[in-house]
Amino acid sequence: MRLSRRGDVDPFIVMDVMEAARQAEDAGRHIIHMEVGQPGTGAPAAARARLAAELDDPLGYTVGLGLPDLRARIARHYADWYDVDLDPARVVITSGASGAFLLAFSALFDNGERVGLGTPCYPSYRQILRAVGLTPVDIPTTLDQRFQPLPSDVATHDLDGLIVASPANPTGTMLNRAALGALAEACAAAGAAFVSDEIYHGIDYDTRPVTALQVTDDVYVINSFSKYFSMTGWRVGWMVVPDDHVRTVERLAQNMFICAPHAAQRLALHAMDCPGELIANKAVYAENRDLMITGLKAAGFDRFAPPDGAFYIYVDVSAHTDDARAFAAQILEKAGVAVTPGIDFDAARGHRWLRFSYARSTADIREGLDRLSDFMAGRKA
C-alpha cells in the first residue's frame, strides 16, 4: 500500500524516552521521570467528584465549538487574569492543544506556506506543519535573547506566519508585553499570521505571563487544560480566534473532530473553579524549580537560562558531550533518570542540550538530583 509524504515526520523523541523508561520499570528498576512535561498531580479532586455525579447523563456530542458554559467560563478567565474583555463567541474548545494546532494551521495557511518557529521549540509544531503540507522555518535563537524570536525575523525569513510560546517549551522563558507587542506588529506589517502558544500560563514564578490578547486581537491564542489544570490525559484545550475566523474554524472542527470529548469539557469547566488545589500545585513547581536550579548547578549542569515559567530547564551540556541522545540514554541506564535530548527541540544544535522537567513530586526531584550528582561524580572518577 502506498504512503503519503505527509506521514514522513520525525518521531516525538520524548515519547521514545518515555518508552525506554517504561521498559526499564517493567524490568524492575525505579526510574525518576524528568523527561516529560506531565504534572505529577491529576485533575483537581473536587472537579472529578462533580463530574462523577454527572456521569448518569448521556454525555453525547456537544456543538463543534464546545460547551457554551465552558466557553463563557474561559472568557471570564481572561477578564479575571488579564483584564481582557473577551466575547465567548471567539472561544473554541479543542481536543487538546494538538487539536487546536491542526485547526489553526488549516484555517490560516495554504499548502507550502512558511511558518516560523524560534528554535529550540516544541517539536510537534514542526511535524504537524509538515503533515498538513506547510513549510516549517527554523529561526535559531540564543541564550542571550532568552531563546525567543525577534521582530526582524518575520521579514528576514519571509514568513507567512509565526508561532511563539511564552512560557516556552523547552526553555521556560517568557515574552514581556513590549516584546509580544513588537512581534505582533511585525507580523501585521508583513501580512503574516500570528499564533501564540500559552499552554503554560498559570505556571509562572516571579512575573505573570502576558497573553497576546492584551496586545492584539489579530492572533490565534492556543491554551490547554493539560498543564496548569493537570488534565493531560483528558485531552481538552481551547483557542481564541478573531471574530471573522470563528465560522471557518467551526466548519473545520465539525468535520475534523465533531467536538472535543464531552466528559473532558465538563471536567475542565469544574477544574476552573478549584483554585485551592491549583495554587497548591504551583507551589510545588516553585519549590522544585529552586531545587533544580541549585541541584543541576551542583551536579555540573550549570549553563542554562533560569526559567520564568513552565516546569523545564534547558541545559547546555556541550562541556560533557556532543551527542545528547546517547548521553540521555547513558543517564537513564546508569542513573535511572529519564531526561530528554535537545534534538527533539532543535535539530541543528540540540545535540549539545538536554531538557530536564520538574513537573513531578518534590521527593522525586530530590532523588533525581542526587542520582544525577552521583552519575556526574562517577564520570569524573
Image (cartoon, grey):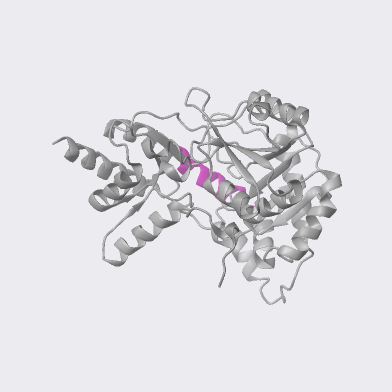
> Quadrant where the N terminus lies?
bottom right
Figure check: 367 above or below 183: below
Residue 16 % position (x, y): 41, 57
> Quadrant where the C terminus lies?
top left
Quarter assignment of residue 166:
top right
The structure residue drawn at horizontal position 29% and vertical position 30%, both measured from the top left corner, is 319
Secondary structure mostly taken by the magenta-highlighted segment of the chain? helix
Let me know if residue 85 appears in the view: yes
Let me know if residue 68 appears in the view: no
Magenta includes 276?
A: yes
| Residue with the most extreme left position | 381
Quarter assignment of residue 258:
bottom right
Nearest the eye: 41 or 235: 235
Quarter assignment of residue 182:
top right
> Which residue range is magenta in the image?
273-286
The structure residue drawn at horizontal position 60% and vertical position 57%, both measured from the top left corner, is 6
Nearest the eye: 8 or 368: 8
Nearest the eye: 306 or 272: 306
Residue 234 % position (x, y): 59, 62
